[in-house]
Image (cartoon, helix red, strand yellow):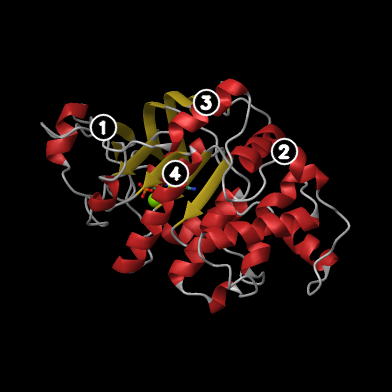
Amino acid sequence: MYKLSGVTKNYQKGRSTVAALRGVDLVIEDGEWLAVQGPTGHGKSTLLQILGGLDRPSSGIVEFDGRDLAQLRETEVTKVRAQSIGFVFQTFNLIPTLSALENVEAALVPLRVGSAARQQRATMALEVVGLGDRLRHAPGELSGGQQQRVAIARALVKEPKVLLADEPTGNLDEDTRDDIIGLLETMWRERGLTMVLVTHDSSIARRAQRIGVMKNGRLGFKQPRPGQSRPGQSRPGQAARVQAARTGGSVITDMGAAPSPAAGLMPTDVQPTDVHPTDVQAGLARAADPADPADLAALEDSDLDDAELEDAELEDDADLDSELPDFDDPDSEPADTITFD
Ligand code: ADP
Ligand code: MG
């Protein structure tokens, strides 16, 4: 699915340059679940944004399905993102003035899905995440866990290949955290998703097939403990998916119609009865890409800490596991600034 080679990302910060990624090589297989841990400020979100085509690397190759996202034109990247990549964020990123249903519909607007099909698919997506009875609620009328479920429905309604989740349970209490991770795991298992999950929480990371560790802008991998078989997860649905790919068929899921002939057969002149389509359309067009870099920049701003990367050599990957056993403490190991003259 992904092949990254020599990916770097530098940010200007006043007169200094922050090297957020310092040469990341990474292959992610189709259908893999990768967790990424690491201290705050060491490049996890930057990596996720580059995987999602929300940002471009300063150098290196970001191959997604055989195409280099670093080289594609912006309109092409936007298209890839709209079709193939779902995002879930710590702060949910829902549009407060839209209902749960409209928030989920927003993901289908760039794909030019007609309003009736959009509504139907968004309704089904919300039913899948257990919110069939909250369609008309605004985000402010939902609990944190429910808001994250809406965000998951929004990410998955377009039937993406990839789900990128940046600390999706960071704002949730423990019980809700377990519900949300359980939901993500089910979605991953049943839909043949490729999933990259950034988390501070070791108990969550352990549920993934592979654990990466970002430190100083470089990515290492934790080794499975002796006697413990990792990848520990298998996905029963994978065989069906492979079979479907072989036969040219599609895997039927319960999230609603994938872009398929059936979707095209839906009547497109049926309008929602209790919303004004033009308002919704305008609102959705504005909100069409919840992962829009401008929105994200504003959002992430508050999230960024002052920790910057130290100009020290990273230990060998083999040392990472013993040296960085746990990242449950989000404030661990702030690093220094790198200044380039
Ligand atoms: P993490 O997600 O691991 O906490 P980030 O990827 O958000 O780390 O940030 C890595 C480093 O890059 C940090 O030092 C952060 O301050 C810096 N950084 C991230 N985004 C920006 C930006 N848009 N502008 C300037 N610096 C940034
Ligand atoms: Mg982050």
According to the picture, the residue beneath numbered tag 3 turns out to be 243
Q: Earlier in the sequence, mark 3 or mark 4?
A: 4
Q: Earlier in the sequence, mark 2 or mark 1?
A: 1
**Residue 324 quadrant:** top left
Name the mark on residue 260. 2
Name the mark on residue 153. none
According to the picture, the residue beneath numbered tag 1 turns out to be 221
Please provide percent x and percent y for residue 190: 47, 43
Q: Nearer the viewer, residue 27 or 161?
A: 161
Against 106, residue 35 (above or below) is above
CA gap between label 3 and label 4 equals 17 Å
CA gap between label 1 and label 4 equals 21 Å
CA gap between label 3 and label 2 equals 18 Å
According to the picture, the residue beneath numbered tag 4 turns out to be 188
Q: Residue furthest right?
A: 269
Q: Residues within 10 Å of mark 2 (few under 14, many from 20)?
A: few
Q: Does residue 43 appear in this view?
A: yes
Amino acid type, residue under disc 4 in the picture:
Trp
